Each structure stands twice: as structure tokens, then as C-alpha cells.
Amino acid sequence: MAETYIPMARWGRDHWRCLAYVEAVAVEMAGFQVGADPRMTANRRHFRILADHCPRPRRPNHPPRPGLVMQPEYATRLADGSQPDPAHDDWCCVQDMAAEGLFTAGPDRVQPGETLHLSERGLALAADLRQHKAAGHPIGAFRRGQDNLEEAVCPA
């Protein structure tokens, strides 16, 4: 999957939406299993690998149909609206999350069949995101970066 990771300070709606979905599944299924998921965007390479190696990951009410390969124009958008990589999909977002310490495993463990668990930092960030949404704010307006998250979750 990705070799370089997008830092949290640059994340936009696509990253936050993906985190909200991952957290919902992780709560329902005692972890988030990496596998073919029609609710997540997948570039051509990820789609093929996940469909071959983990075609039916554990999901509540998992749709019986496979997803579709993402078109490049639907690649991840960052907070500034840019799309730095036409192949950056939701699975790349999950790796970005792992690189930021939101899972108990690093980005190299985002592999088919692997079950990811949110770390304390990931749980705290997901809770902040839910609170933001519950207050009626759009998910794309959520902002977290090194400053406020580290103060709230990782005091020195």
C-alpha cells in the first residue's frame, strides 16, 4: 500500500469519514478487519488484493455484493481540497491513521485479513469526531493536528 503517509494536520472530509466508519465497525465487531468492503473506496490494486485475500471481512450487515474500483477523480481530498495522489483511497487513509498511532498496530499491518484495534489515541479522536458531528457540524469542518490532539490525549 502507501509508502508515504499524509499527516493528520492535512486530513479533510475523506479521512474523517473513513475514521468514523472504521470506528463504527470496530465497535460492532471487536476490531476492524482489513478486507474487501463496498463501503470503502479502493483503487484498482487494493480492490484486487482485498477481493482475492479477504473477500468477506467481518462487518455488521455486510452487503453481499462486491464494491467497485474507484475512479481517479474520487481519490482522497485533503483539507485544502487538493488530491495529491489519484490512487489514494480509503485504505491509504487507514494506513495514514495507523501511521498517526490511531491503531495499536502500525501501517505495515494494514494487510488483508488483519484485524485492527483503535489505540487510546484513536478512541479519543473518534470520540471528538462524534461529538463534533453530534453538535451539528459538518464532518469536513473537523480539524485536529499535532497541537490540540497531543495536548488532550498525550500530555508531556
Image: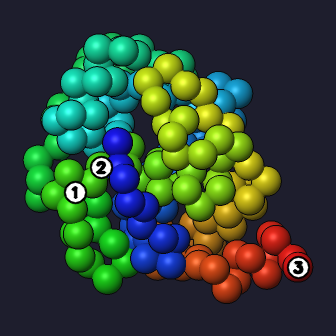
Which one is nearer the viewer's eye here, 122 or 49?
Answer: 49
Q: Which tag, 1 or 2, sits closer to the chain's start?
A: 1
Residue on which the image places disc 3: 156
Residue on which the image places disc 2: 89
Q: Residue at x 59, y 61 (%)?
A: 100
Location of the C terminus (image quadrant): bottom right
Residue 136 position (above or below residue 101): below
Q: Which tag, 3 or 2, sits closer to the chain's start?
A: 2
Residue 36, given in percent of the width and then of the height, sits at 35, 25
Which one is closest to the eye, mark 3 or mark 2? 3
Dot 3, how many residues are within 10 Å of its Cα: few (below 14), some (14-19), or many (20+)? few
Residue 129, given in percent of the width and then of the height, sits at 61, 65
Q: Residue at x 37, y 29 (%)?
A: 37
Of the numbered discs in the image, which one, if any, rests on residue 75? 1
Spatial CA span between label 1 and label 2: 6 Å
Which one is nearer the viewer's eye here, 117 or 26?
Answer: 117
Residue 95, given in percent of the width and then of the height, sits at 47, 49
Q: Secondary structure at mark 3?
A: loop
Taking 6 as reference, is 105 left or right?
A: right
Which one is nearer the viewer's eye here, 105 or 72?
Answer: 105
Spatial CA span between label 3 and label 1: 36 Å
Residue 89 position (above or below residue 31): below
Location of the N terminus (image quadrant): top left
Q: Residue at x 70, y 27 (%)?
A: 30
Q: Secondary structure at mark 1?
A: loop
Q: Which tag, 3 or 1, sits closer to the chain's start?
A: 1
Residue 58, given in percent of the width and then of the height, sits at 53, 19
